[in-house]
Amino acid sequence: MSVIVVNKSNFESVANSEKPVLLDFYADWCGPCRMVSPLVDEIAEENPQYLVGKVNVDNEPELAAAFGVSSIPMLAVMKNGKVVAQAVGARPKEQILDMLK
């Protein structure tokens, strides 16, 4: 699966996915976000059992506010429409995968 660009118009369908959801909150100008982004892309390609989305906080300030994003990159994992894990800052791929378990 490829990464989905998440915005307020498709957020409900993403949040209510049957699969665990990994959301990457980022901005194009953010250096650590650029380090995490390729890892998130790899996870999406290698793990079809997960739904992986990216939220540009500059384009989607309402979604960022709804998740309480105060620092980026921020990763959030949702299961059954609820946030079950969050992490702020760059993380290695293994730590991101562990969040999904």
Image (cartoon, rainbow, N blue to C red):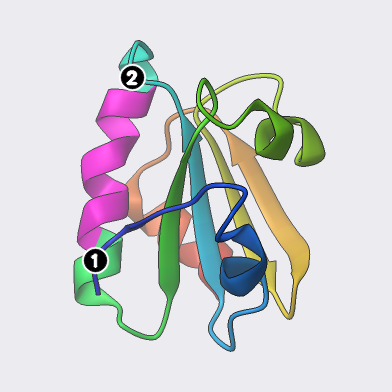
Quadrant, the C terminus: bottom right
Residue at 20% from the left image edge and 58% from the top image edge: 42
The mark nearer the N terminus, 1 or 2, is 1
Numbered range of the magenta stretch: 33-42
User: Residue 83, image x and y in percent?
Assistant: 75, 60
User: Residue 5, image x and y in percent?
Assistant: 39, 51
Q: Are marks 1 and 2 in contact (CB under 8 Å)?
A: no
- Tell me which amino acid carries mark 2: Asp
Determine if the magenta segment contains residue 96. Answer: no
Q: CA distance from mark 1 to mark 2?
A: 19 Å
Eyeballing the image, is 97 above or below 72? Answer: below
Residue at 75% from the left image edge and 72% from the top image edge: 81
Q: Nearer the viewer, residue 16 or 68?
A: 16
Residue at 67% from the left image edge and 77% from the top image edge: 16
Give the number of marks. Answer: 2
Q: Answer few, some or many: residues within 10 Å of disc 2's Cα (few below 14, many 20 plus, some between 14 and 19).
A: few
Secondary structure, magenta segment, majority class: helix
Eyeballing the image, is 32 above or below 93? Answer: above
Element type at marker 2? Answer: loop
Eyeballing the image, is 75 above or below 36? Answer: below
Residue identified by numbered label 1: 2
Classify residue 69 by image quadrant. top right
| Horizontal side of residue 73 vs 61, given as left or right | left
Residue at 58% from the left image edge and 32% from the top image edge: 60
Quadrant, the N terminus: bottom left
* Label disc, if present, on residue 28 of the rendered structure: 2
User: Residue 41, image x and y in percent?
Assistant: 24, 54
- Tell me which amino acid carries mark 1: Ser
